[in-house]
Image (cartoon, grey):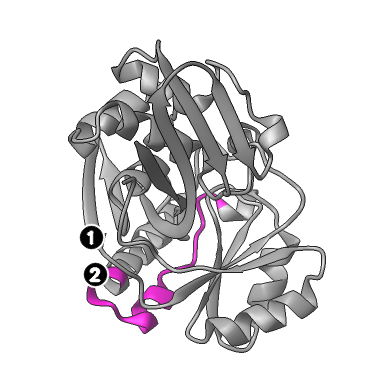
Amino acid sequence: MTFRAPATSANLGPAFDCAAAALELWNELEVSEGEGVVVEGEGADELPADASNLAVRAYALLADPAGKRFRFTNRIPLERGLGSSAAAIALGLAAARPDGDPEQLLAAGLELESHADNLAAALVGGVTLTWEGRIARIAEALPLAPVALVPRARTSTEASRRSLPSTVTHADAAANAGRAALLAAGVAAGRAELFVAGLDDRLHEPYRPSAALDGIRADLPAGARGATLSGSGPTVIVWADDPRACANVLTDRFPDHDVLELAVSRRGVM
């Protein structure tokens, strides 16, 4: 049996810790009779080829991995804010329980992944909201296309979270609530102008410095309408109505980054 799980981009600006989109960039897990763990693809030499592999650990939450052989293929850049961990966990959960209820799988997976937003989108696809263990899939697509600007440098999510303040001002909280409402309206209605108006954030992006994000916002590439950090970064998602033109400009401006023209995946792990 072979399973695929998508990359994800969480937060989408102001929807901190509750919204994410599944992306057309896939990791794979093949489970067969036998023994052992094989790891292939990007960063394969950094990922454990034993029972401590995250996909195998997720499988073990719901089924006995004894007598199974796992072949894991990684294509999602590691520690770049694109949900590589959530994809691995979604793969293990789905392989152990192919017909599992997504919210039950989410509850199980949170033992390994503390950020429900990425995992929810990896499980069900599309654009999702999550709260108190619930998942709402609010759209199959977004009104603008995501173009990912992926640096060579990495970011630890936990280290990035330590940079966030424990409190924010009432003004920032109110501004973020308004922008999150605009964002959700734009997603649900498929209206790009509302989506773009809702991308501004005051809860996490100001505390996660990104020269790339600042530079893109100050001088939007041709075909681009806005930009956000993907999760805790360092990847920047540039939201474009002409993704090819946008990607061409980004490639020229950031030669030391990878530029990925992506799309929202309507499918989650499968």
Q: Are marks 1 and 2 in contact (CB under 8 Å)?
A: yes
Residue 142 sits in quarter: bottom left
- The disc at residue 138 is 1
Look at mark 2 in the image and give the residue it sits on: 188
**Given the image, on which type of amino acid does mark 1 rest?**
Ile
- 216 left or right, relative to 85: right
- 210 left or right, relative to 69: right
The correct choice, above or below, for 116 with respect to 145 in the image is above
**Secondary structure of residue under mark 2:** helix
User: Would you say residue 60 is visible in this rendering?
Assistant: yes
The correct choice, above or below, for 230 with respect to 221 in the image is above
**Given the image, on which type of amino acid does mark 2 rest?**
Ala
The residue depicted at 37 percent of the width and 61 percent of the height is: 265
All told, the count of numbered labels is 2
Q: Which image quarter is the N terminus in?
A: top left
Residue 73 pos. (x, y %) = 55, 41
Residue 91 sits in quarter: top left
Residue 94 pos. (x, y %) = 31, 34
Residue 192 pos. (x, y %) = 37, 81
The residue depicted at 63 percent of the width and 48 percent of the height is: 77
Sort mark 1 into few (<14), some (14-19) or many (20+) by Cα contacts within 10 Å: some
Sort mark 2 into few (<14), some (14-19) or many (20+) by Cα contacts within 10 Å: some
Distance CA(mark 1)–CA(mark 2): 6 Å
Does 69 lie within the magenta span? no
- The disc at residue 19 is none
- 258 left or right, relative to 146: right
Does 200 lie within the magenta span? yes
Q: Residue furthest right?
A: 256
Instruction: Provide the residue span drawn in magenta.
Output: 187-204
The residue depicted at 69 percent of the width and 68 percent of the height is: 214
The residue depicted at 30 percent of the width and 53 percent of the height is: 128
